[in-house]
Image (cartoon, helix red, strand yellow):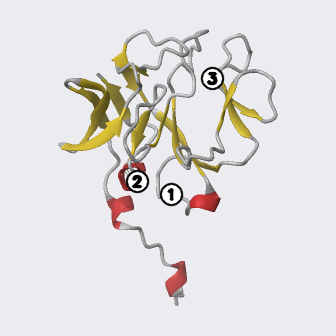
Amino acid sequence: MKKKPLPEETSRKSPAARRPGASRLRVVARPGSPARGWLVLDGRAIPVALGRAGIKAGKHEGDGATPKGVWHPREVRYRADHGLRPTTRLPVRRTRPEDGWCDDPRDGRYNRPVRLPFKASHEEMWRRDGLYDLVVVLDHNQRPRKTRGGSAVFLHLARADFEPTAGCVAFRRPDLKRLLARLTRATRIEVV
């Protein structure tokens, strides 16, 4: 006779996890306000903050632009001390105080995660302002990696007033959490 699983052993998926993965998302700037925009998912527009220079083809390190193109999510990083592990189909890593991201084009680890302390210029992933409490790492300028092609372009949390980013796409926490449940490594994020 087959043994029944105990209730806590039964796999129960949240409603968000039962929804199909998002195959395509579009990020567009708001007319007249290039540093603000929308991410469009299933016909629904979600407000986002964009780079202070708006959306731009041919991104360069430090230009403040959100890069135009098609990007794919690679992994999620989160601060366990600021929230539970997010529901997602992507690989997940806990952010640690010693996590950084190299943004120095002269360094061989440019646009790669690094361990702090780190001598070359870098982003600190363990931020005091909470913007990187939830981060989706994108494949922007990964393969091939171009010197000065832009680094640390992420999906992350927005400031309360949707202040422009340095080139990322930023969301309200509830919107990013809902989006995380739909992202897969095959999701196409079209920034137009």
Return the residue nearer the eye: 157 or 5: 157
Disc 2: CA contacts within 10 A as few (<14), some (14-19) or many (>=20)? many
Real-space CA distance between mark 1 and mark 3, rounded to the nearest whole angstrom: 24 Å
Q: Which residue is mark 3?
A: 111
Q: Which residue is mark 2?
A: 181
Q: Amino acid at mark 2?
A: Ala
Residue beneath the point at 66% across and 12% down: 105
Q: Position of residue 99 (x, y in %)?
A: 71, 40
Return the residue nearer the eye: 4 or 91: 91
Toward the bottom, the furthest residue is: 1
Circle 2: element type: loop
Disc 3: CA contacts within 10 A as few (<14), some (14-19) or many (>=20)? many
Disc 1: CA contacts within 10 A as few (<14), some (14-19) or many (>=20)? some
Q: Which residue is mark 1?
A: 86
Circle 3: element type: loop
Q: Are marks 2 and 1 in contact (CB under 8 Å)?
A: yes
**Mark 2 vs mark 1: which is more N-terminal?**
1
**Mark 1 vs mark 3: which is more N-terminal?**
1
Q: Quadrant of the C terminus?
A: top left
Q: Are marks 1 and 3 in contact (CB under 8 Å)?
A: no
Count of numbered tags: 3
Choose top left, top right, bottom left or bottom right for residue 116.
top right
Circle 1: element type: loop
Q: Position of residue 140 (x, y in %)?
A: 50, 23
Return the residue nearer the eye: 26 or 170: 170
**Mark 2 vs mark 3: which is more N-terminal?**
3
Residue 26 in view (yes/no): no
